[in-house]
Image (cartoon, helix red, strand yellow):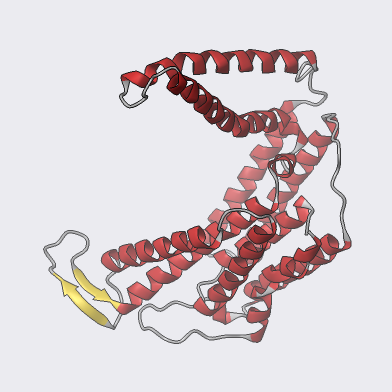
Amino acid sequence: MRHSKAWIIWLVVTTVLLLTTRNPVYLFIILGVVLTLGTLMAKQKTQQPWLKPNLRFLVTMLVLSALINTLFTHVGESVLFTLPDQWLLIGGDITLESLVYGLINGLVIGALYITFNIFNLALSIKQITRLIPNVFHPIVITMTISLTFFPSIQRRAREIKEAQLIRGNPMKRISDWLPLLLPLLITSLEKAFLLSESMTARGFHNQRDQFSNRFLAISLIFATFFIFSGWILRLYAYPFLISFSFYLLSGGFIVFALFYANRKVNITHYHRETWSWEDVLSSILLVAAGATWITLLTTGNLPSTAYTPLPKLLLPKIQFQGVLIFFSPMLPLLFHHHD
């Protein structure tokens, strides 16, 4: 897969799968898929070792989540040991069920981190910034400048430091670093003025917007109102179909507002992305897997997703359709040799 929108679909489907289940079997399946995918992509892009730092973060999240949940959640039948009740907040029974529940939450957090890490690995900065709607093009420019600012500052600081060392400055004490600040500040200001002059010469943001910002603001306000309305109705146990209708209406307002605003903002894009058959096929399969997953959840035909070890630790149930859907994020693996 190469197209940025295909990777957006992959990211959305994978994130939804991770956030809508606590079944450890399903979570381990998707974790194995993303770890394998990330390792192959990092090897293909000849980057630094990718697997080790991600596994380190995953283990850290597992330990922290298990520790916090075990100390502050005293629920479960399998008591490991008991802390004195006089100990504030953490006093009480330390149970195996709360430990397992904390490990599951840590597994979700670690898998989400790895998922977004793969998304960042798959797309370049140019592709990510192009995903932002045209109406927000000043934000895109600001993000691009910000992302390139710190590397240039670090490179310039390294050059100034080498020049100071050649001139006999040992750069060991804090006072020895003061001669580095003034050249670095002057260089940064010169580059900032040069960038602003070049952007002005190219007419950046010199023309008035051809649409009313008031229309976009009103549409987003209505969308926010419908989102909160659906959420409040769910709190008061109204039928899910009513809340879901409000969510769809809110999404419709957002999509229509952005579509209308994008057509009114004229921006020239060079080297547009093209859809390959791998992108189209993987996107269709991912959308089908996500739609099937949501349908099974809303109709209650997939009870194995609602696993919880509290108050008694039991083995999680497994359903074939759940296992099949959780293997869907591996679709980029089938096309990785084409990238």
Is residue 273 at least partly visible in the picture? yes
Tell me residue 31's x, y (percent).
56, 70
Q: Which of 256 and 191 is in front in this view?
A: 191
Q: At which x and y percent is residue 40? A: 66, 64
Front-most of residues 315 and 128: 128
**Image position, residue 237 (x, y; %):** 53, 65
- Going by the image, does 41 lie left or right of 35? right
* Residue at figure coordinates x 60%, y 30% from the top left: 146
123 sits to left or right of 16? right
The C terminus, quarter of image: bottom right
Residue 244 shows in the view: no
Please give left or right for residue 257 compared with residue 227 in the image.
right
Q: Which quarter of the rendering shows the N terminus?
A: bottom right
Residue lying at 51% horizontally and 60% vertically, measured from the top left: 54
How far across and how far down the image is residue 68, in percent? 32, 62
Q: How many labels does the image show?
A: 0
Up-down relation of residue 33 to residue 131 (above or below): below
| 249 shown above or below 60 | above
Q: In this view, does 77 lie above or below 110?
A: below
- The answer to whether residue 287 is above or below residue 172 is below
Q: Which residue is drawn at 35% across and 67% down?
A: 66
Q: Quadrant of residue 15?
A: bottom right
